[in-house]
Image (cartoon, rainbow, N blue to C red):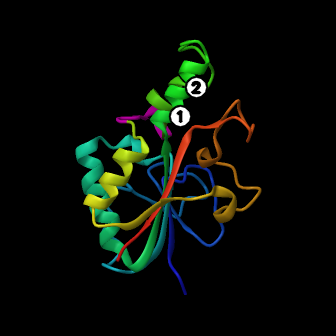
Amino acid sequence: MSLNLHLGCGSRHLSGFVHIDLDPLPNVDIVHDIGSLPMFDNGTVDLIYCCGAFIYFDREEAAAVLREWHRILRARGTLRLSVPDFEAIVEVYLKSGKDLDTRGILGPLFGKWELHAGKFLYQRTAYDSTSMFKMLGQAGFTNVRRYDFTAVLPADFDDYSKAFIPHMDPTGIQICLNIECDKP
């Protein structure tokens, strides 16, 4: 039986996954910081899916988080990661006539997420494909590539990996960088 983790899941539920988040929501199986997962032994996880939560770690923390996720993945296990795509957001900004108030620009760059009891998380960095591919390679991942959300997520599942500007318009600009890679 495979072990799949949905890290930073918030209120979103993926069938067949163990859901881990800091917020004690009804669908969360384990309330814990996703940057450190001591409850999992080395090489025991088949797939890690994390959408929109990795950007809450700064660059130094992010490197350590990737090493931790690499540790728990089995050989040939997959990390599937979705982060706001800085390059795409800049494209939206430029096409908008350099209007920072264009809907969908500031949230992916500087968003904050309210947790329980009035606690907040703030996004701490941004990535483009070059920086994300480099960081994943430095953490020991191989075969780094983009993934198509339509091929890996249920059609009725909605999260930031499917974010477009204009909103929900697949002919618009996709503003999330969807990347998967493997542990050798």
At 34% from the left edge and 66% from the top edge, which residue is drawn?
A: 141
What is the secondary structure assignment of the residue under circle 2? helix
Q: Report if the CB atoms under discs 2 and 1 are less than 8 Å apart.
A: yes
What is the secondary structure assignment of the residue under circle 1? helix
Identify which amino acid the numbered label 2 is placed on: Val
Dot 1: within a 10 Å radius of its alpha carbon, few (fewer than 14), some, or many (20 or more) residues?
some
Residue 77 is left or right of residue 14, and the answer is left
Q: Would you name the residue on which mark 1 appears?
A: 88
Using the image as rendered, state which of residue 20 and residue 58 is in the foreground: 58
Residue 61 is left or right of residue 166, and the answer is left
Using the image as rendered, state which of residue 141 and residue 25 is in the foreground: 141
Which span is picked out in magenta? 116-125
Give the x, y percent position of residue 46: 47, 77
**Label placed on residue 92:** 2
**Label placed on residue 178:** none
Give the x, y percent position of residue 154: 72, 62
Q: Is residue 37 visible?
A: no
Residue 105 is left or right of residue 169, and the answer is left
At 70% from the left edge and 29% from the top edge, which residue is drawn?
A: 166
Give the x, y percent position of residue 128: 42, 41
Where is residue 95, by image quadrant? top right
Please say if 56 is above or below 73: above
The quadrant the N terminus occupies is bottom right
Instruction: Compute the Cα span from label 2 to label 1.
Output: 6 Å
